[in-house]
């Protein structure tokens, strides 16, 4: 029998896939970005239904909230127009769609058959913040710290790229 | 608790909270006009009703009957969706805010003469006993309530950003850009300033956080987080909250002197009213959060007969929120607006390090 959770899970899945397809179909970058937000939010719903409450909340705050705002910000700032369709993009469509389908089927098959893990039942993931915390800060402390160093490097790179080169003095306009 | 009691309680709670919130939004506008008026040696609204009390109703009617103008060359789907996004996410975050202890519903007996034959109800005759059920005064108590509010607020940015972009107007675009940059910047300080409280309470649930602040030191100083060492966190939260709600002194996205009206320049009638409602609903949410996290929520002195004791917690909660709203208006009547570079350097160079320092100090103190 279909429980309410399972129905919701399937509904979020449909929204997620529809958003992803819309992302590819739309020609205007802002529409694509908004579709990506829908995908992120629907994924958060899926995580929540699986039982991973903390991951769901972080997904909304970090991805749907912060990162996608910056995407939209960039699109607005550059005033990016409608995407151009060239011959190259047609070739990409011709080969890309079958390739993507094949690739995703392959990945799904490998995961289901050969990863040694099982599919999670709805609501079965132990994802409350109280269980995530000790996992992050005890068992996976080293990967966690290494990830933060990685992000720190990325931040420093961004600062270096964004700051003006010190050699060029500010030109005065008379 | 049977499912029909749960559904009935949820529907009633949602309806009551929504009506109260929208009324509060309308009367916060009235309060702001009145208080700022008096601060500037004017009267504020006086004509509609006693003390201008019916002014919000008159304004609402006016917004409804104004021409709903859509300028040419706007990007219509987003132009229409933007105010909806703003107001929907502003109203959503109230759903996890607790405003009092639980109330006990029942037990009472259904009178014999009531001809109950509703199929959903588990009884078909009078004389059945309903309850007692414990109903929390909160639409829903999720154990990541704090994160939910942060997530909903971070999505709410899109309303402002998309309004600015889709209006096809340089002033609107600048307003939208300012709003999104400002909100992303201050969200970090906002989040970090709350972590200190979370560490002290050990939970994301707003109800648990409030309950952890009950009791007193030496019998008279309440055990609110602001008195137990989180005043720096409160300061950071307050500053970041002003920036998140686009209020003076951080109202750069709608700076009239530079940007006409910022992101909502091209909006009229009810669409404009939606942005207005979203702004004031956000103010109320932020005030609720400040009350819950730093000022002990509904904790306060209880006295008098039993019925008064049941009402007092909700009264204390409302009174604290009123205090915060008054502070908002007071600041608006007092401070000038920041420059944009001042806003950014204040957020990144002062507020962020301060909130990180507060977080580290709290963590050390708790671990001690």
Image: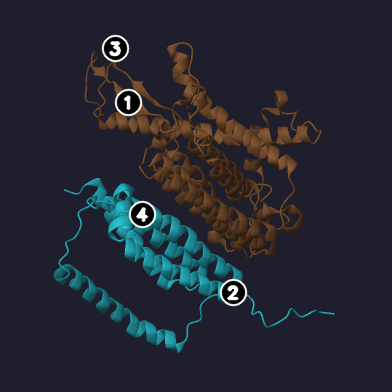
Chain colours: A cyan, B brown
Q: Which mark is residue A56?
A: 4
Q: Are marks 4 and 3 on the same chain?
A: no
Identify the chain of the residue marked 3, using the numbered disc in the image: B
Answer yes or no: is residue A140 visible. Answer: yes
Q: Quadrant of residue A172?
A: bottom right
> Mark 4 to mark 1: distance in Å?
29 Å
Q: CB under 8 Å between callouts 1 and 2?
A: no
What is the x, y in percent for residue B267? 64, 53
Instruction: Work out whether mark 4 precedes mark 2 in sequence or the reverse, and give the earlier one.
Output: 4
Residue at (63, 48) in percent of width and height? B272
> Mark 1 to mark 3: distance in Å?
22 Å
> Mark 1 to mark 2: distance in Å?
56 Å
What is the x, y in percent for residue B287? 55, 38
> Mark 3 to mark 2: distance in Å?
74 Å
Q: Secondary structure at mark 4?
A: helix
Q: Which mark is residue B134?
A: 1
Q: Quadrant of the N terminus of chain B?
A: top left
Identify the chain of the residue marked 1, using the numbered disc in the image: B
Q: Are marks 4 and 2 on the same chain?
A: yes
Answer yes or no: is residue B149 visible. Answer: no
Identify the chain of the residue marked 4, using the numbered disc in the image: A
């Amino acid at each position: 029998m279909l429980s309410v959770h399972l129905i919701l899970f399937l509904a979020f899945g449909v929204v997620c896939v529809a958003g992803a397809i819309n992302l590819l179909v739309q020609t205007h970058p802002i529409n694509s970005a908004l579709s990506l937000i829908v995908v992120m939010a629907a994924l958060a719903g899926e995580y929540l239904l699986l039982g991973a409450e903390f991951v769901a909340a972080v997904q909304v705050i970090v991805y749907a909230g912060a990162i996608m705002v910056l995407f939209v910000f960039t699109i607005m700032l550059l005033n990016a127009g409608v995407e151009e369709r060239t011959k190259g993009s047609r070739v990409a469509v011709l080969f890309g769609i079958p390739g993507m389908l094949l690739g995703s089927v392959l990945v799904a098959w490998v995961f289901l058959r050969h990863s040694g893990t099982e599919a999670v039942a709805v609501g079965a993931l132990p994802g409350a913040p109280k269980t995530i915390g000790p996992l992050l800060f005890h068992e996976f402390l080293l990967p966690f710290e290494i990830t933060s160093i990685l992000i720190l490097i990325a931040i420093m790179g961004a600062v270096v790229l964004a700051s003006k080169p010190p050699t060029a003095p500010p030109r005065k306009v008379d | 608790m049977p499912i029909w009691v749960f559904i009935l309680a949820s529907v009633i709670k949602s309806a009551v909270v929504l009506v109260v919130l929208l009324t509060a939004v309308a009367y916060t506008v009235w309060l702001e006009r009145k208080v700022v008026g008096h601060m500037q040696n004017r009267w504020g609204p006086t004509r509609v009703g006693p003390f201008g009390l019916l002014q919000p109703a008159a304004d609402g009617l006016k917004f409804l009957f104004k021409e709903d103008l859509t300028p040419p060359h706007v990007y219509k789907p987003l132009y229409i969706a933007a105010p909806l996004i703003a107001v929907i996410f502003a109203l959503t975050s109230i759903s996890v805010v607790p405003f009092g202890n639980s109330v006990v519903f029942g037990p009472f007996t259904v009178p014999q003469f009531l001809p109950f034959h509703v199929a959903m109800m588990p009884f078909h005759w009078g004389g059945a006993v309903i309850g007692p059920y414990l109903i929390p005064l909160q639409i829903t108590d999720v154990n990541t309530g704090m994160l939910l509010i942060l997530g909903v607020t971070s999505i709410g940015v899109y309303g402002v950003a998309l309004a600015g972009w889709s209006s096809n107007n340089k002033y609107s675009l600048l307003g939208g850009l300012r709003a999104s940059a400002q909100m992303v910047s201050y969200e970090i300080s906002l989040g970090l300033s709350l972590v200190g409280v979370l560490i002290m309470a050990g939970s994301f649930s707003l109800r648990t956080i409030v309950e952890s602040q009950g009791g007193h030191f030496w019998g008279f100083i309440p055990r609110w987080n602001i008195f137990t060492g989180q005043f720096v966190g409160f300061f950071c939260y307050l500053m970041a909250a002003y920036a998140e709600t686009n209020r003076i002194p951080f109202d750069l996205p709608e700076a009239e002197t530079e940007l006409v009206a910022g992101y909502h320049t091209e909006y009229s009638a009810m669409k404009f009213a939606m942005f207005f409602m979203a702004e004031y609903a956000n103010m109320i949410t932020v005030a609720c959060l400040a009350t819950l996290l730093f000022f002990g929520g509904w904790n306060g002195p209880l006295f008098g007969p039993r019925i008064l004791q049941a009402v007092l917690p909700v009264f204390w909660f409302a009174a604290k929120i009123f205090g915060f709203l008054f502070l908002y208006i007071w600041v608006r009547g007092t401070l000038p607006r920041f420059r944009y570079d001042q806003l950014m350097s204040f957020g990144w160079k002062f507020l962020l390090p301060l909130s990180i320092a507060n977080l580290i100090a709290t963590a050390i103190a708790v671990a001690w």
